[in-house]
Image (tube, rainbow, N blue to C red):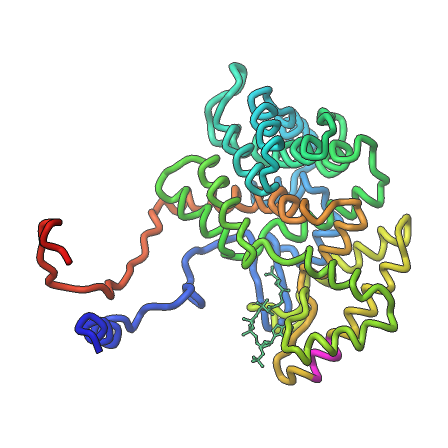
Amino acid sequence: MRPFEFKTEIIMSTITPDFVPGLQGVVAAKTRLSSVDGQRGELIIAGFPLEEIAPNATFEEMVYLLWNGALPNATQLADFCQRLAAYRTLPAFTIDLLRTAAEQRVPTMDALRMGVSTISLRTPDEPDDPQRDALAIVARFPTIIATYWRLLNGQEPVAPRANLSHATNYLYMLNGGEPSAEQTRGLETYLNTVVDHGLNASTFTARVIISTQSDMVSAVVGAVGALKGPLHGGAPGPALDMVFEIGEESRAEPYLRAKLERRERLMGFGHRVYKVRDPRAEVLSRAAEKMFEADGDMKLYRLVKHVEQTAVALLAEYKPGRNLQTNVEFYTALLLHGLGLPTELFTPTFAASRAAGWIAHAFEQQEAGRIIRPESVYIGEHDRRWLPVEQRG
Ligand code: ACO
């Protein structure tokens, strides 16, 4: 054993009793925004059970609720919708940047991060205040995503319309035509379902940044960076790929069994926190059912249901006692695919919703008024001595 390894071991065993890898189980914030109970499969958003609020609220109502602590009355809602919609249009400098990014075929999450940064560049009529930034961020996420996606695919951007709801306008800018009422409802339910989820990695990132008295745009840009990683931004794409590879109900069992025999993971199943069915999967599965029944590929919907039932049964057989259930990613894939979104836009669309949650947490953190500054344990060497460069081996 080399000397420094010996020292490291001594230090680890003597002064690291409080080190918690990944901060698992560490409580780092008090929040009124959401509560996640993984054992009971319960998600509460600002006092409402998820299944109560997600299929009923518009996204604007949800954002208002998170930022103000109560649902708006009719006058407040109309005023909020108007103020939000007023920020949808991208300034020319943002479109120019996205055009350059599209020429270089930058991945969508990177283009989104760069586009969001430009919200710090104010046009002459925009005030310099955090409320303006909060509105501009939520209003412009869909415009940035839709503009970039169209440029990337050789199409000219579609300008936003202030007379459409937030969700309707997003689909309108992506496709160039107005969606059906069922499609808008499907997207709103999705956006409401993923808007907040406790102290996840990107939300924590936003809180850390704002806790230094940094600004809202910086907090959200940092959070986008955290969300981009595959361990957080999730795997709805692979879950959908798996369903397409299966192709037919009769192939589900042999396909999934073969995967489990090879000790591979089934995408869209299992969760670190939820040990029963993820409540978001339940809400999204109902939303997808309504949307597909109205105007969708029912064969695909039935295949997805069959794959889910088969996967849960096989996971119980191969991993008894693990309680591996359907997670949010599985039905996210079906719902967003049903809305005509390509897999490249799944994570950016998740971000378009979660941005409202990040901002709500940032407001809360500002109220807490305390910098987040944990400790680390030094496990490096001690007592090194300086050697001039010519004497080093
Ligand atoms: N398919 C097959 N086996 C699984 C799966 C799965 N989807 N998930 C867990 N397992 C097994 C593991 O192999 C392990 O088995 P073992 O003890 O016999 O080796 C056991 O269940 C426990 O696995 P862990 O990784 O310790 O469980 P953890 O709770 O940490 O994992 C995770 C959570 C990472 C989500 C996991 O379930 C997984 O990889 N799922 C597939 C990927 C996926 O759907 N990701 C999106 C998650 S949703 C979200 O993050 C928003």
x then y, percent, for residue 44: 61, 58
x then y, percent, for residue 281: 71, 62
Q: Confirm whether residue 157 shows in the render.
A: yes
Q: Is residue 194 above or below residue 58?
A: below
Q: Using the image as rendered, state which of residue 118 and residue 169 is in the foreground.
A: 118
Main secondary structure found in the magenta portion? helix
**Quick check: 238 left or right of 116?**
right
Quarter of the figure with the C terminus: bottom left
Residue 172 placement: quadrant: top right
Residue 250 placement: quadrant: bottom right
Quarter of the figure with the N terminus: bottom left
Q: Residue at x 52, y 42 (%)?
A: 359
Q: Is residue 241 magenta?
A: no
Q: Confirm whether residue 75 shows in the render.
A: no
Q: Using the image as rendered, state which of residue 197 and residue 171 is in the foreground.
A: 171
Q: Residue at x 78, y 63 (%)?
A: 245
Q: Is residue 205 above or below residue 156?
A: below
Magenta span: 312-317
Q: Is residue 172 above or below residue 268?
A: above
